Structures are given as structure tokens and as C-alpha cells.
Image (tube, rainbow, N blue to C red):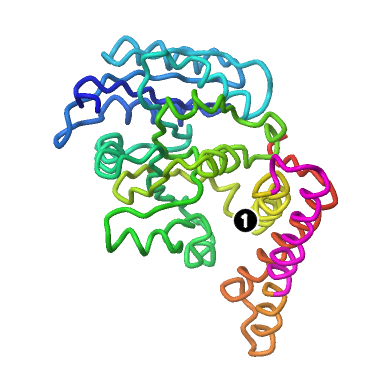
Amino acid sequence: MLAPSKIRVTVCACTYRRPRGLAALLEGLGEQNFEHVPRPILRIVIADNEGSTRARQICDQFRLCSDIPIEYVHEQQRGISFARNACLARLGDDCDFFAMIDDDEIPHPDWIEQLMLIQQRTDADVVQGRVLPELPDGAPGWIARGRYFDWQLKSDEARAAQQHGYAVLRRARTNNVLVRFAVVRAMGLWFDPRLALTGGEDIAFFEAINAAGYRIVYAPLACVRDIIPPERTTLEYLWRTWYRVGCNERWRGPHLGKPNASRLRLLWRNWKRTGTYAFLLGLALLIGNALTGRVSLDHLGEGILLIARGLGRVAGLLGVRYEQYR
């Protein structure tokens, strides 16, 4: 096992038209502290999918005031998969772990330390941290009460982590994660370019790692703040997001890598089960609440969004590609 003081961690972030978010992210990275583990050798890679002069300047300013090396790269090919792969391509052979975080997030001062503590405790290959959404002033009350941006709090893994301090996962996301680079290198793994504009490339990436037998765990104390902009706090945005998630599931799961006939059979069984279930459950919630006179979005929101996800799964089976990020 590596001596903790010799561990090399590269923090990767993709950015696109968010200069203020990028500046806040870098400020948070510059303030990382380590009280319970020796400070690792840190490095930062920023992949800019826009090629913004302002983003480059923000990185240059950080370089002048921090002792953490930073590399700025302009990824010209549009799409989140290409930006994430630009980060992977710049990980040196001496990199032990890379962490990923979004450009609309701000890490807690002990973010990296908490990821490392759970990694060392469990010897996991991937550690997923906790994302704490911060809604803007004036956000609709039904969204705040429904916790639609706080999926982790409602998950079975979150409840398990309350008892044991961590939980085993089957997948992870790039919005707060630490990954053993040797695993990715051994697998020859990259983010799927087919999902560059649809999203879901990170789920597919980590499901492949899990399917190969590597371990993913959840670290509830490794926290980042997710700054939610006002334009995302609408029913329209949530509908499009849940529909996109349903569409993307055709690219994931046990059918991947199988012959066409087997893949189609597995896809069909999956959509009959989960797509129909999501749609009918959403419809039942709508009807049930309507019959009891509860017709506010507090009561109808989840049913509406489950219908969106079910429709997305059906659309995905039919070959629809919903490019929400175009």
C-alpha cells in the first residue's frame, strides 16, 4: 500500500460558460485542509468545452495564488464525454487517484480528506461523495419539499451509510467522486462519446467499473455544495431531466457487450418491467391524489415525473436520443 504522504490525486473538472462557478470551485479547492490524513500531492485539470478567455484567466489567477499545479485545456469537440476524456488524457502515469467535481459545485474544506478516509478504510476503487443542493431564493416550495435535487438523501445507500459510515454502491456519478486511476487504465475505459450530448455518460462509466468486479462505496461526509440556478427549478426542467434519464437507460445495464439478439431480448424485458412500472406508478399517484382532492404539485409532482421517466424508457427502446445538453 502507498505511504499516504506519497499519494497523488488529480482533481478534474469540466466547465462550460460558468466563470463564476469555476472561480468558486477553484477557491474551494485551494482551501482544502487535511487533519486526519497526510496531505496528498494535489494537481488540478480544468477542461473547458467553450474555450473561454475568462475561464483561462481564472485558471491563470489561481496558479499565481496557490501552490497546487493547475492545467487548463480547451476541448474543442462539443459534449461532456469529450471534456471528461480530455481530463483523463492528462492524468500522468504517476497519478494514483483522480477526483471529479462539477463547475457549479463548491467543495467543503475537508472534501478530499473525507474521500480518502473512506477509501483507506474500505480499500474501495471508487468513492462517491455527498452532494448538497442549494436552491436559489424564490425556488418553488414543492421542489424544496419534494427534495427533487437531493436524490442521495432518499436512497437506500444513504440510510445504510447512517449506520456504518459508508455504503456499497453499484454505480456512481462524476459530480463528487474519487477513482483509483489504475483501474481505469487497466480497463482502457473512457467516457462514451455517444452520450456526449444526452448525459448519462458517467453512470455508464461507473457501471462498467462495477461490472468488472471493482468496488464502489458511498462516503456521506465527503460533501460538496451544488448551486442550483433558478432556471432549473421548474416543472419543465425536471420533466426533461427525468425523461432524459429514462431515454439514457438503453445504453446501460447487463445488455451491454452482448450479441444483438440477446441485447434486444434483455432490453425488451427491462422496458416491459421498469418502463411500464414507472409509467403506471406515476399514473396511479396522479389519479389517487386527484380523487382525494390533493391536486397541488406537492402531491402530483412525483407522479408526473415518474410518467416522464417511463415515457423516456419507452422512447429509448424505440431508439430515441434526447440530447438535453445540445
Snapshot quadrant of residue 34: top left
Q: Which segment did they paint magenta?
A: 255-280
Q: Which residue appears at 53% of the width and 40% of the height?
A: 212
Left or right of 196 in this view: 65: left
Snapshot quadrant of residue 127: top left
Reply above or below: 7 against 115. Answer: above
Would you say the magenta stretch is mainly helix, strand or loop? helix
Q: Residues within 10 Å of mark 1 (few under 14, many from 20)?
A: few
Dot 1 falls on a residue whose secondary structure is loop
Q: Position of residue 177 (x, y in %)?
A: 42, 38
Left or right of 177 in this view: 321: right
Which residue in the structure is indicated by mark 1? 234
- Residue lying farthest left? 35
Q: Position of residue 80 (x, y in %)?
A: 62, 30
Q: Which residue appears at 45% of the width and 51% of the height?
A: 169
**Quadrant (top left, top right, bottom left, bottom right) of the C terminus:** top right
Reply above or below: 174 against 9. Answer: below
Q: Is residue 39 magenta?
A: no
234 or 45, nearer to the observer: 45
